[in-house]
Image: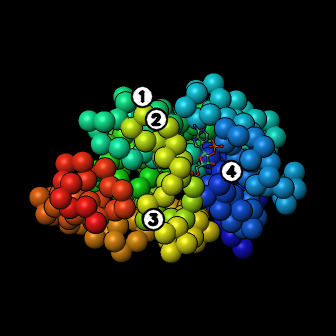
Amino acid sequence: MSSLSNKVVIISGASSGIGHALAMVAISRGAKVGVCARNLDKLKVAFTSITEDKIYLHQADVSKEEDCQAFINGVLSKWGKIDVLVNNAGISMRALFEDADLKVIRELMNINFWGTVYCTKYALPSIRQNNGVIVGVSSIAGYRGLPGRTGYSASKFAMQGFLEALRTELLHTGTHVMWVSPGFTASNIRNVARNANGNIQGETPLEEDKLMSAEECAKIILDGVEQRKRTIIMTGQGKLTVWVNKLFSGLADKLVFKHFLKEPGSPLLKYHPQQKI
Ligand SMILES: NC(=O)c1ccc[n+]([C@@H]2O[C@H](COP(=O)([O-])OP(=O)(O)OC[C@H]3O[C@@H](n4cnc5c(N)ncnc54)[C@H](OP(=O)(O)O)[C@@H]3O)[C@@H](O)[C@H]2O)c1
């Protein structure tokens, strides 16, 4: 039997992609699941097949402290406890820093970093009582800054620093803190990534159907939660990037630059137009 059986697992940003898959896999392992996202109709459609005793849906924008508090309180009113919090809600960007409106960086920090801080703050008392687990869905961008994603990288570095400090505070208390770094995973994140003006870019530079599926990613995350892993870097490419960056950071600059220059429509082409492919 899964150790998630009869546990209360809550997930931010679960109307699509990895968050939705996490909720479905957690339910299949016997958990009761509380989820939030900004669009309640989308959430309702996403979980239409799940009965009310298994799911709690809540409309919340995690960049708003009061929404996060209301989400946690809603879960506690329904089930009286929280065992696992997965801070998953997140958005991305694609623009050079010199072109990006500062509101883009602010929005990324507000959702990806502050959303994690708010949900963790309000869920922590119950998670502590239950010797539970706090998870951050980070990225390789939390270990290695990526060009065209300054705000995204900053938000994931901040998330990891916050969680690492919290893990150390909570060492020997029975509460576990971890983060996971998926590789490129099929989802909506690139379609809704912000451009320089803060608008949705409306396309993906990747072939989404060739990426890891959100379901596979969710299974790896929940296996990690059950085993109380410290961190998970999910792909060979991710592991190599983190390793090269640690040991040969100058080389990592060049390799990462080259990789992102080749991306269709790369913002880096502004500085290197002769490289157009
Ligand atoms: N997919 C990848 O390749 C990849 C790789 C590494 C890390 N990640 C991380 O994985 C996490 C999930 O991303 P995904 O790829 O599954 O993207 P996704 O398909 O775009 O899903 C994002 C989810 O977050 C919700 N959300 C966005 N802003 C929110 C806000 N302010 N408040 C509450 N909910 C919000 C969205 O719903 P609403 O818009 O309705 O709010 C949606 O349910 C993110 O933290 C991302 O950084 C993804």
Judge from the rendering whether residue 24 lies leftward or rightward of residue 95; answer left or right: right
Query: Which is more toward the observer, 105 or 82?
Result: 105
- Residue count near mark 3 (Cα–Cα under 10 Å), binned few <14, some 14–19, many ≥20: some
State the separation of the CA atoms marked 2 and 3. Answer: 20 Å
Residues tagged 1 and 2 counted as in contact (Cβ below 8 A): yes
Looking at the rendered structure, the secondary structure element under dot 1 is helix
Pointer 4: what residue? 15
| Upstream in sequence: badge 2 or badge 3 | 2
Residue 163, position as x, y percentages in the image: 42, 45
State the separation of the CA atoms marked 3 and 4. Answer: 21 Å
- Residue count near mark 4 (Cα–Cα under 10 Å), binned few <14, some 14–19, many ≥20: many
Counting the numbered discs, the total is: 4
| Upstream in sequence: badge 1 or badge 3 | 1
Judge from the rendering whether residue 101 lies leftward or rightward of residue 120; answer left or right: left
State the separation of the CA atoms marked 1 and 3. Answer: 25 Å
| Upstream in sequence: badge 4 or badge 2 | 4
Pointer 3: what residue? 206
For the residue marked with disc 1, what is the amino acid? Lys
